Amino acid sequence: NARPLVIAVDGPAAAGKGTLARRLAAALDLPYLDTGLLYRAVGRRVLDRGLDPRDVVVAEAEARAMTAEDLARTDLRGPAADMAASAVAAIPAVRAALLDWQREFGRRHGAVMDGRDIGTVVFPDAPIKLFVTAGAKERARRRWAELQARGVAADLDQVEAELRARDAQDAGRSVAPMKPAEDATVLDTTALDAEAAYAAALRLVRARMATA
Ligand code: CDP
Ligand code: CDP
């Protein structure tokens, strides 16, 4: 019995991981999991209590108390939620509390999972790993356009500064830092629209599946 296929899609903020992973999952008939939502939900629970997301005791308790309903909340995106997610994500006990859940999700029916550490920590044996990236200015422009589309007024320079600060925190933490796995394929989408990025990723995936 073959192991269910897991495809890891990692990379920095607003690189287009979710857009790409969702399309790959639909094309390959695999479940999709946005692992960033887990950290966002934990960060949101801490903010709801009026506490500091860097508080390790509080953040671990909220990670353990998190429920499926938390993942369906509509206030998981935006600057405060972004930074709270990144803060709780730097705490080892929070990551440990979320690890089994992610592994069980992937093992059940396979999955396309997007995040920061899927290829390095959650599924280091995944046969297909993409590290999706783009220049910081282009990623800021994409995030800014999303905010505009949601009717949220935002300043492009400020979006870029927040995105760079979050990337630095995610890449610099000691536990599960954001980085391409050694066997990941890096896909730089700075000059690619979502359609072209998807086409490139699908070619990579099909080539890998043919040789696996
Ligand atoms: O998941 P991640 O934060 O990496 O990015 P996302 O939520 O998929 O958002 C990326 C945004 O950039 C979406 O609005 C896409 O339409 C757009 N985009 C993209 O995903 N890929 C490109 N190559 C170019 C633009
Ligand atoms: O959509 P965007 O790329 O801006 O962020 P996200 O994927 O929703 O992740 C939010 C935050 O959660 C990141 O900045 C990371 O700090 C954290 N995260 C993580 O540490 N590990 C993951 N596998 C996914 C997210």
Image (cartoon, helix red, strand yellow):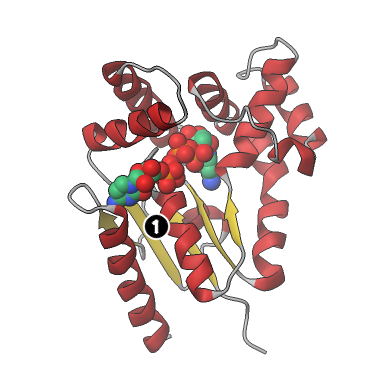
Q: Nearer the viewer, residue 23 or 54?
A: 23
Q: Quadrant of the N terminus?
A: bottom right
Q: Position of residue 100 (x, y in %)?
A: 72, 53
**30 horizontally vs 94: left or right:** left
From the top left corner, tell me how far across and down residue 188 is, in percent: 24, 53
Quadrant in the picture for the C terminus? bottom left
Residue 103: in sight, yes or no?
yes
Looking at the picture, does residue 78 appear above or below residue 5?
A: above
Task: Indicate the quadrant where residue 140 lies.
Answer: top left
Picture mark count: 1
Task: Give the percent coordinates (x, y) of residue 86.
Answer: 52, 29
Question: Is residue 125 shown to the viewer in this render?
Answer: no
Left or right? Give the position of 182 relative to 49.
left
Amino acid type at mark 1: Ala
Q: Residue furthest top?
A: 50
Between 193 and 105, the one nearer to me in the picture: 193
The residue at 36%/55% (across/down) is 131
Q: Is residue 50 above or below residue 64?
A: above
Q: Is residue 108 left or right of residue 181?
A: right
- Residue 159 coordinates in the image, percent (x, y): 34, 22
Residue at the extreme left of the image, as rendered: 191
At x 26%, y 61%, the residue is 196
Image height check: is 126 above or below 61?
Answer: below
**Residue position for label 1:** 181
Left or right, 9 with reference to 76: left
Q: Is mark 1 within 8 Å of ligand 2?
A: no
Mark 1: few/some/many CA within 10 Å (<14, 14-19, 20+): some
Is label 1 in a helix, a strand or a loop?
Answer: loop
Residue at position x 74%, y 20% in the image:
58
Write the residue at 72% across / 42% down: 97
